[in-house]
Image (cartoon, rainbow, N blue to C red):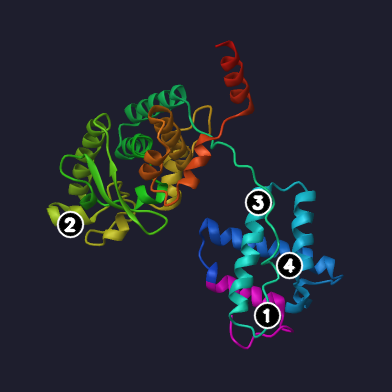
Amino acid sequence: MTKKTTSNSSLTTTVDSYLAYYASSNSHTSRAKRLDLNHFLEFLANLRGLSKVSKLKLNDWDFSSVQRFVDDCLNKGESPATVARRLATLKHMGRTLSDKVPNFINPAKEVKNPKVIPGRPKALTKKEVKTVKSNAKNIANKKQNFKSLRNKTIFDFIIDTGLRAEEVRILKMGQIDEDLEWIKNVRTKGRRYRNVYITSKMRPTLETYLEERKKKLMTIYGKLSAKENKALPVFISIYKAVPGKQDSFFMGAKSLWRAINELSTDTSLHPHLLRHSYAIDLLDSSNDIRLVAQALGHSDVRITMRYTERKDQEVAKALEKSRKS
C-alpha cells in the first residue's frame, strides 16, 4: 500500500497490497483476511453492477456498501461472529488506508458490529477426559513408540496447564525448572509473560516422557550438553531434525493439532478445546474468575467472563432450586 493510492485507484490492487503486507503468511488469521476481503469484493462488484471485481474503484467502497454487506451476510445465515470478523477486517484495512490516502475516511469505521451473545465455550466433561486419557494410553501401549508417548503427554500437559497450542509448541526445556513444578516466562498473546504451574499429578507423566525424549535425542546427538538441551523444545519432532539446528526440532503447528485430534473418541479434539476444559474445570473448583484469568494469561478479565456463561436450562434449574428453599 503506497502513498500514491488515490480515491480513484483500483480497489482490487489496493486490497492485494494490503493483503501482501498484513496477510502474506499461511496462518489462520491471514487466510481469514483473504477470505473476508474476497467475499466483500464479490459482493461489492455485484452491488455496483460490475462484471468483474477488477473494475472496482476505491471510491466504490463507502459506508452504505459496508452496511449492506453486513446485512447481506446476516440474511444469508452467517453467524454474527463470522460477520463481526469480516467487518473487523474491513475496518482494519480502512484504518491503514486513512493513513496513506489524503482525505480518505474509513468507510467501515461507523458500521456497528452485529450483536454477538457469547456462549460458554465447549469443554470436555471429566468423563470424556478420562476416556481420552485411556484411549491415548492404549495407543501408546500398542504402538510402543516415542511419537505416541509424546502425543499422549501433550494431551495430559495441556489439560494440566491450560497452555495454548502455540505456547506448547515453542516451549523450551530451559523454561521448566528442575523440579518440574513451574514453567517460566510463558509469553501471552498480549506480549506479557507469566509463570505456569505444573501439578504434582502431572509431574510423573512428564518425567517419564522426558526420559524417553532424552534417549531419542541421544540417538541423534550422541552426547547432548545441558546448554544444548535447554535450547531445544520440550515436545520434539525428529522428522528432518538436524543436530545443532534447534529450530529443526520444533513440531509444526499442524503436527501438534493432529497429535491431539488423533486421540479423538466420540468428540473431535483440538488443542483449544483442552484449554477450555482446563479453564472451566478450574473455575468450577475455585469459583475465582480472577484466578482463572491469571492462570490463562488473559490481560482482561472480561475475556475470561465467557466461562461463567450458563445455559438456559442451568438458569431454570437454579431458579427451581431457589424456590424450594
Classify mark 4: helix, strand or loop: helix
Residue type at mark 4: give it. Answer: Leu
Nearer to us: label 4 or label 2: 4
Q: Which residue is mark 1?
A: 104
Numbered disc total: 4
* Spot occupied by residue 141 in the image (x, y as percentages of width and height): 32, 27
Q: Secondary structure at mark 1?
A: loop
Give the quarter of the image for residue 3: bottom right
Mark 2 and mark 3: Cα distance apart in space? 44 Å
Q: Answer above or below: position of 33 versus 114.
A: below
In the picture of the structure, the residue carrying the numbered disc 4 is 41
Q: Measured along the vertical axis of the image, is residue 125 above or below residue 46? A: above
Label 3 vs 4, first from the N-terminus: 4
Bin the neighbour count of mark 3 within 10 Å (Cα to Cα): few under 14, some 14-19, many 20 and up: some
Asked whether residue 2 is in view, the answer is yes
Q: Is residue 11 magenta?
A: yes
Judged by depth in the image, the label closer to the viewer, 1 or 2, is: 1
What amino acid type should be assigned to the residue bearing mark 2? Answer: Glu
Q: Which residues are magenta?
A: 1-21
Q: Which residue does the numbered mark 2 point to in the structure image?
A: 228
Q: Nearer the viewer, residue 245 or 62?
A: 62
The image's mark for residue 82 is: 3
Q: Is residue 231 left or right of residue 55?
A: left
